[in-house]
């Protein structure tokens, strides 16, 4: 069960990184403008 919690944490972090690197232009464009 502990392994599952750790995996979920890693997955959440990986998804967060992917979401940031996946579409950074969309988030950066409005801020830069």
Image (spheres, rainbow, N blue to C red):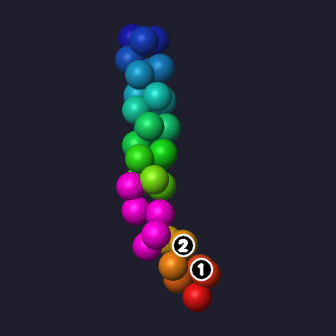
Q: Is residue 26 above or below residue 4?
A: below
Q: Main secondary structure of the magenta part?
A: helix
Q: Residue at x 43, y 73 (%)?
A: 26
Taking depth in this image into account, of 30 and 9 the one nearest to the observer is 30
Residue 10 drawn above or below residue 14: above
31 sits to left or right of 4: right
Q: Tell me, yes or no, whether the highlighted magenta stretch contains residue 9.
A: no
Region rendered in magenta: 22-26
**Cα gap from disc 2 to disc 1, whole angstroms:** 5 Å
The number of discs equals 2
- What is the quadrant of residue 3 in the picture? top left
- Residue drawn where x is 46% and y is 28% of the image: 10
Mark number displayed over residue 15: none
Q: Say which quadrant the C terminus sits in.
A: bottom right
- Residue 28 coordinates in the image, percent (x, y): 54, 72
Give the image location of residue 30, x and y in percent.
Answer: 53, 82
User: Circle 2 sits on which residue?
Assistant: 28
Mark 2 lies on a secondary structure that is helix
| Above or below for 5 versus 24 | above
Give the residue at mark 1: 31
Mark 1: secondary structure: helix
Q: Residue at x 45, y 53 (%)?
A: 21
Q: Cβ–Cβ below 8 Å for labels 2 and 1?
A: yes
Q: Does 23 appear in magenta?
A: yes
């Amino acid at each position: 069960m502990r392994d599952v919690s750790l995996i979920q944490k890693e997955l959440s972090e990986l998804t967060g990184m992917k979401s940031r690197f996946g579409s950074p232009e969309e988030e950066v464009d409005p801020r830069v403008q």
